[in-house]
């Protein structure tokens, strides 16, 4: 949540126009809506589907698992609603799955029994929570805001194998003040309720650490470092004592027990190979709200902070030299709400966007920070605020594409050096939330990408098709030289082509696809369950002729008539009046855009019915309201009976004039029978509406 406007200050002393240098890569809009604040599409619980997408959300809880999957829980939308559903996104298949939780917003938590998992348990609707992934792959969250922007202090564990939540520790009370004592571990005491921090780390002993955050809605900021021991279920308050404290910088690069980043909101965090905890940026408060662009490192063994990089200036303006330049002058402007930060497989920290404390504006700049050299590289985006997005075409990269300026989004990546962005909020002009997914492919001349020899199997294909049609597969695998495909239900059912084309499916249903990618350094297998969906067969079609009118079976979404194989312009109703003799066919389309065809040969059009004394002709046919009879001069007081095609009588009357009112009949085919003495005449006609 963004704090209220406190001061209007000069914010940036930066360039007034975007750099004209070459960009460091390209953005591609790969999933989600391009509309403002969409509600998403949940699909079927537990089933991945290309149509699935979460609602637009700001500051949801998120995790990245060991397979590069993104897990997203809760979040806040521009309509003021909080969610509680849990989603998983696979960047290699570009598929979302609604994994757990309700699709109804503003749900209360169900705690159950502390320490006992249950399918009924749920943390409820919330956002701005702390999150961890433990060394066993479990997902953890703590605190955040619930409905009414009230902070929470509970801690939860989610097991991805059982899909069950467990309330592990912490108070169930709203805005709990906490009971921890400095330096004293306790399984009965608990920390205060907090939000607006994502500075959380998991150490090698599987203990969960957290720094900073706020207790009351943008009033009380804290500088505490606290630790949760999973095995003993104990919290320990390790350092930090003051509310709304200011930073104590010390000497850059020199650790000291007196150093302190100050009480602040905190979002962009990572952990290095030596076990140090890092974060950058965030906001402090002291008579105003100040954004920073500093970088800090914490040693969990000695409980010491080190100011590593960045400025001590409040609302630091930043320096944008040129894109893809590793100048020591480069630094992003001070910002907060920048949880869109990601440590890639090469241990480089990527940072996108964020917001300002002073005027609630947003960034769309993309940066890379090297923790070894302590240098920033401006990779993409503008040095100006509140830039509009350019979506381009779905799944088509372009140098012109770029996400909207935003904050509260999520940044993550894959093993192929691609970076992904999901969700977030744009504040100015007007609050708009997003559910779009973007992929950034770096220019390797700007950001080197050594993906080694690890084989990664990946593919895409048009996967919702009609019976009897075929699809083509695109192989996105890395470091592979040969491939084995399996298409159960398809024809052919196996292939060794790199990107098989023309895989046909005749029978409705859902079908798995498996790809085994083989390279010099091993293999990788990917199986996507129910990836190919073959729609049901459309309803059968036929053509019936009545006079010079041809009728197809009703019920289809669309129709198109053809004469001797040529399309008849404008002939898109279920019936067609033939004005030429020959062969006719109709193509009917159902709600899935699947087609079925029927044909009728040797139609003789423009038939004129002879009317001998013993016969009766009718017109018009088809008829809307009044059916007229020809040759009926000797049929006064004859009995008229109308049957439907099932042989049921639907209308009877005495013939008093050479016309019959059929306006009360439904659309369809009927038989008209006239009985007069020993004469019995029958003719078929069609009833249509206007």
Image: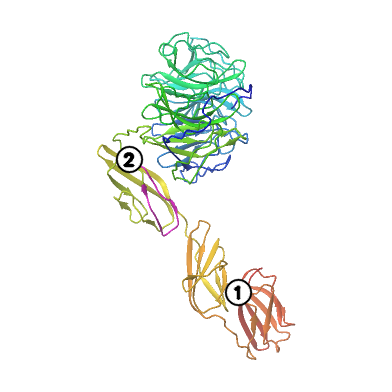
Q: Measured along the vertical axis of the image, is residue 572 above or below residue 96? A: below
In the picture, measured across the screen, residue 413 lies left or right of residue 145, that is left
Q: Position of residue 47 (x, y in %)?
A: 46, 43
In this view, the mark in front (2 or 1)? 2
In the picture, measured across the screen, residue 512 lies left or right of residue 317, that is left
SS for callout 1: loop
In the picture, measured across the screen, residue 408 lies left or right of residue 490, that is right
- What residue would you read off at disc 2? 478
Instruction: Please check the rendered image and state whether residue 205 is part of the magenta-colored stretch, yes or no.
Output: no
SS for callout 2: loop
Q: Can residue 556 be seen here?
A: no
Q: Residues within 10 Å of mark 1 (few under 14, many from 20)?
A: few
Q: Residues within 10 Å of mark 2 (few under 14, many from 20)?
A: many
Snapshot quadrant of residue 9: top right
Q: Position of residue 184 (x, y in %)?
A: 49, 10
Q: Can residue 328 be seen here?
A: yes
Q: Residue at x 35, y 54 (%)?
A: 501
In the image, the segment drawn in magenta is 457-474
Q: Measured along the vertical axis of the image, is residue 428 above or below residue 287? A: below
């Amino acid at each position: 949540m963004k704090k209220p406007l406190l001061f209007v200050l000069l914010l940036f002393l930066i360039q007034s126009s975007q750099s004209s240098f070459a960009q460091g890569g390209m953005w591609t809009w790969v999933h989600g809506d391009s509309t403002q604040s969409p509600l998403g599409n949940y699909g079927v619980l537990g089933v991945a589907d290309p149509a699935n997408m979460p609602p637009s959300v700001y500051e949801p809880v998120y995790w990245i698992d060991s397979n590069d999957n993104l897990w997203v829980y809760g979040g806040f939308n521009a309509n003021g609603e909080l969610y509680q559903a849990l989603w998983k996104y696979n960047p290699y298949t570009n598929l979302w799955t609604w994994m757990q939780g309700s699709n109804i917003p503003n749900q209360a938590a169900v705690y159950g029994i502390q320490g006992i998992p249950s399918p009924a348990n749920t943390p409820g609707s919330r956002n701005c929570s702390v999150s961890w992934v433990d060394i066993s792959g479990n997902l953890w969250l703590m605190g955040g805001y619930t409905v009414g922007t009230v902070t929470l202090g509970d801690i939860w564990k989610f097991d991805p194998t059982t899909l069950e939540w467990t309330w592990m520790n912490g108070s169930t009370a709203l805005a709990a003040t906490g009971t921890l004592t400095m330096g004293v571990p306790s399984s009965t005491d608990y920390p205060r309720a907090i939000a607006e921090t994502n500075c959380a780390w998991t150490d090698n002993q599987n203990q969960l650490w957290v720094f900073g955050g706020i207790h009351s809605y943008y009033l009380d900021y804290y500088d505490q470092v606290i630790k949760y021991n999973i095995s003993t279920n104990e919290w320990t308050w390790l350092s930090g004592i003051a509310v709304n404290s200011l930073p104590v910088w010390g000497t850059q690069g020199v650790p000291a027990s007196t150093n302190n980043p100050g009480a602040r909101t905190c979002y962009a965090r990572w952990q290095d190979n030596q076990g140090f905890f890092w974060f950058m940026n965030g906001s402090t408060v002291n008579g105003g709200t100040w954004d920073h662009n500093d970088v800090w490192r914490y040693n969990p063994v000695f409980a010491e902070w080190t100011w590593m990089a960045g400025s001590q200036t409040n609302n630091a303006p930043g320096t944008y030299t040129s894109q893809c330049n590793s100048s020591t002058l480069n630094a992003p402007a001070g910002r907060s709400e920048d949880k869109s930060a990601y440590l890639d497989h090469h241990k480089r920290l990527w940072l996108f966007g964020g917001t300002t404390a002073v005027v609630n504006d947003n960034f769309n700049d993309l940066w890379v920070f090297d923790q070894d050299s302590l240098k920033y590289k401006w990779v993409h985006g503008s040095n100006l605020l509140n830039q509009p997005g350019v979506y381009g075409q779905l799944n088509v990269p372009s140098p012109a594409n770029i996400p909207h300026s935003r904050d509260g989004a999520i940044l993550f990546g894959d093993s192929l050096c691609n970076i992904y962005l999901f969700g977030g909020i744009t504040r100015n002009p007007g609050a708009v939330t997003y559910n779009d997914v973007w992929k950034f492919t770096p220019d390797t001349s700007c950001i080197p990408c050594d993906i080694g020899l690890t084989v990664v199997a990946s593919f895409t294909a048009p996967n919702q098709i009609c019976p009897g049609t075929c699809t083509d597969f695109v192989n996105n695998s890395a470091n592979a030289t040969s491939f084995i495909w399996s298409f159960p239900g398809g024809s052919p059912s196996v292939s060794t082509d790199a990107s098989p084309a023309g895989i046909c499916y005749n029978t409705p249903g859902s079908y798995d696809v498996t790809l085994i990618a083989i390279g010099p350094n091993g293999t990788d297998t990917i199986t996507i369950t129910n990836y190919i969906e073959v729609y049901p067969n459309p309803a059968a079609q036929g053509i019936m002729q009545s006079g010079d009118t041809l009728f197809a079976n009703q019920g289809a979404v669309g129709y198109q008539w053809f004469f001797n194989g040529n399309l008849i312009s404008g002939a898109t109703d279920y019936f067609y009046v033939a004005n030429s003799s020959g062969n006719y066919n109709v193509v009917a389309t159902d709600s899935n855009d699947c087609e079925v065809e029927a044909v009728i040969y040797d139609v003789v059009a423009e038939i004129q019915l002879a009317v001998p004394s013993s016969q009766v002709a009718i017109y018009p046919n088809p008829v809307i309201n009044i059916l007229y009879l020809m040759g009926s001069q000797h049929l006064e007081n004859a009995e008229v009976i109308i049957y439907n095609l099932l042989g049921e009588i639907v209308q009877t009357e005495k013939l008093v004039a050479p016309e019959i009112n059929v306006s009360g009949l439904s659309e369809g085919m009927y038989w008209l029978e006239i009985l007069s003495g020993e004469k019995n005449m029958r003719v078929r006609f069609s009833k249509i509406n206007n």
